[in-house]
Amino acid sequence: MKVLVVGGGGREHAICHALSKSAKVDKIWCAPGNGGIASIAECVDITATDIEKMVAFAKENKPDLVMVAPDDPLALGMVDALEDAGIRAFGPHKNAAIIEGSKSFAKDLMHKYNIPTANYAVFEDSAKAIEYIKEQGAPIVVKADGLALGKGVTVAMTEQDAINAVKDAMDGGAFGSAGARVVIEEFLTGPEVSVLAFTDGKTIKTMPSAQDHKRAYDHDKGPNTGGMGAFSPSRMYTDEIAKTCMDTIFRPTIDAMAKEGRTFKGVIYFGLMLTPKGPKVIEYNARFGDPETQAVLSRLETDIFDIFNAVIDGTLADIDIKWSDNAACCVCMASGGYPAKYEKGKVITGLDDVTDSIVYHAGTKLSDGAMVTNGGRVLGVTANAKTLDEAIKKAYADVKKIHFDGVHFRTDIGVK
Ligand code: AMP
Ligand code: GLY
């Protein structure tokens, strides 16, 4: 079977790697892919959001399945367009991907169906938003409504910070049209856990829990990033909490989407906060998370191609998905300066010396036979072991073997 994976980061490398282990898959394309993905898939020079070119490529090359991994092509309706062209596609339709693409949609859905989340209000007028902030006081959270590369959220500890965030998003156009509407939310506290799940719209099967590390520097200091590392499972996510989440959040969300005529098929990501009043939803994503996927999929024992097909066919209830009891740790190696300005094209050495980890590539490319940096997050060094402490040690032992100019990584992944 032939599969096309859309995307080109560490998450897509992990998905291609899982597909490459399937006895049924003999050809993988990845568009656009990256320098590391090129070792297991044929990289195709099409931007992940270019629906027209992606559909044309699929029509010509006839993959048996197209897996759309990133948020923006999903929000733009790439799965709908592929299906309209008669191509089998994995991922939510546009009308379901909105659960990530519009935070106000997600909040209104949770409100309507009593799914626990922070109290909130939605504004399209900055003066009214500012008035509301003054009424509520700080700390308070300001979120751009649309997709903003993970940068649209401000956790404001003072009223002034919240007001500035509203002005930047609504009057300053910091996030373009994604910030024309804002959600203002009650500040919650507690540990955060990511739970990803496969769903065919009727059945939902969760993957092992994970935690990511969004801040750039150790001890959760510095600016928010796409994620500097992840580990699985979370130490906080007990069986009892998992059951509560299934009963109050996961099942109700899938049922709510179906009731709204927006049946969700694909991978849904629940960003949860375990608050003193129970687990609450911080955010939904309509896709695999990055870098959680690198940690979580390294524990998958079932053929992922079979799971993708079961999701598409609506037969997820019939498939038994097995995960190893191992713990996994993924440490991201980033370009110096990320998430702000950074340089590209630095030669990466030491990749062949790695012994105990899988190195998923995020921002790399092959240039004259050398692997060079080509993005903010460059590599995700991912190790498995019986215990989390061992997995952390193994991942960091391999991180030390890899070098490029200006490399930056956190030294405390998995410690919190
Ligand atoms: P998001 O992009 O929605 O994942 O938000 C980024 C981060 O902001 C989350 O991982 C949380 O750490 C924080 N955050 C989001 N919403 C809230 C909230 N209501 N209360 C406290 N922290 C929040
Ligand atoms: N790691 C968070 C995300 O993928 O959105």
Image: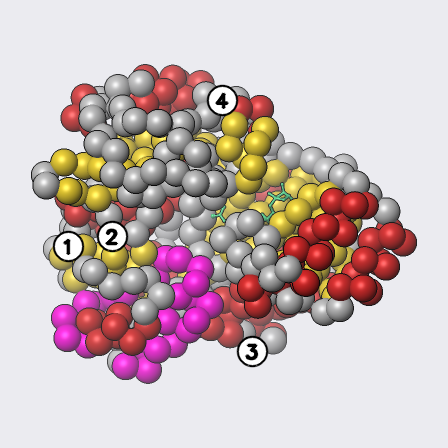
> In the rendered structure, which amino acid carries the disc numbered 3?
Gly
**Residue at left offset 39%, top offset 66%:** 73
Q: Cβ(mark 4) to ligand 1 < 8 Å?
A: no
Which one is in front, 32 or 240? 32
Helix, strand or loop under label 2: loop
Task: Mark 2 and mark 3 in contact? Answer it, CB < 8 Å.
Answer: no
For discs 2 and 3, the disc positioned in front in the rendered view: 2
**Count of all numbered marks drawn on residues in the image:** 4
> In the rendered structure, which amino acid carries the disc numbered 4?
Asp
Distance, label 2 to label 3, CA atoms, is 34 Å
Q: Position of residue 177 (x, y in %)?
A: 57, 68
Q: Cβ(mark 1) to ligand 2 < 8 Å?
A: no
Q: Position of residue 52 (x, y in %)?
A: 29, 76
Specify few, some or many for label 2: CA neighbours under 10 Å numbering under 14, 14-19, or 20 or more. many
| Mark 2 or mark 1: whose residue is earlier in sequence | 2
> In the rendered structure, which amino acid carries the disc numbered 2?
Gly
What residue span does the magenta drawing correspond to? Answer: 59-85
Residue 306 can be seen, yes or no:
no
Q: Provide the residue designation for mark 4.
A: 412
Q: Locate ligand 1 by image quadrant.
A: top right
**Residue at left offset 15%, top offset 42%:** 367
